[in-house]
Amino acid sequence: MEPESLKAPFIDQQEIWRRADDFRSRVWPSNQIPIRVLEIVEFELNLELRPISRLKEDNDIDALLLGNWETIVVDQAQYMDDRYANRLRFSLAHELGHFVLHREVFEQFPRDSVEEWIAFMRDIPEKEYSFLEYHAYEFAGRFLVPPEALRQEFDAAIRFAAKNGMPREQLQSDAHMQYLAKPVSRTFAVSSSVIERRLAKEKLWPLA
């Protein structure tokens, strides 16, 4: 089958969240934060993590789950550079989203090599590709940032702000949200933008 015939499944947000929560409970039952996604990939799921030179530079790809369902390739430069640690963690969680949500779709389109799989992904119709990527992005955010832990850490950030002269009732602007998200992001080992998105998605921001 050719990539042009691919149709993304309909999966609503609540179902993505449920499957991310269920998957996390299975592969990381301690719920210890941060979620150690590299350990999960290599030791819980026994997936090969294969660094590839110039993957990002040549293909604009941080990580890619291959069609053998046994390997995730990652950009070698990012993998070796601690400055990209959080980005790598999110990229791997994103690929786990495809692993959990899209196996039935992708198994219809077998491709063997890294090059074939990259070419295949590029040829998927843009609309269908955007649906698949949304699913995986939403899965990754929920997987790495469990909602109850997010509420606890966000409440702690609000209390800290109050102690430093910014009471809850004054926390209203985007700048305030960014200020609160920064320490929370360090706890979960993700970017501040991921936390900002989760706060909105989980209806924790704007503050009631």
Image (cartoon, helix red, strand yellow):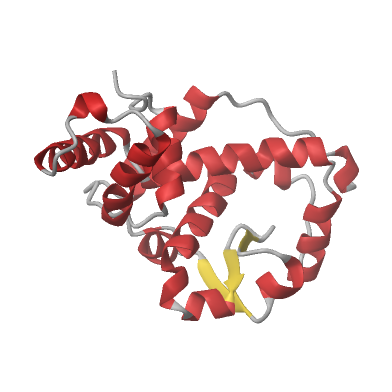
Image location of residue 81, percent across then percent down: 46, 79
Which residue is located at x 58 percent, y 70 percent?
74
The image quadrant of residue 134 is top right
Query: If the image is split into quadrants, where does the C terminus sit?
Result: top left
Judging depth in this view, the residue of 91 and 109 nearest the camera is 91
Number of on-image labels: 0
- Relative vertical location of residue 156 with respect to residue 204 in this rendering, above or below: below
Q: Is residue 126 left or right of residue 39?
A: right
Image location of residue 70, percent across then percent down: 58, 62
Q: Is residue 71 left or right of residue 15?
A: right
- Note whether residue 207 is visible: yes
- Relative vertical location of residue 126 with respect to residue 44 in this rendering, above or below: above
Which residue is located at x 59 percent, y 46 percent?
98
Image location of residue 176, percent across then percent down: 33, 38
- Note whether residue 142 is visible: no
Which residue is located at x 20 percent, y 28 percent?
168
- Relative vertical location of residue 93 with respect to residue 4 in this rendering, above or below: below
The image quadrant of residue 101 is top right
Which residue is located at x 39 percent, y 54 percent?
190
Extreme residue in the left direction: 163
Q: Is residue 117 left or right of residue 76?
A: right
The image quadrant of residue 35 is bottom left
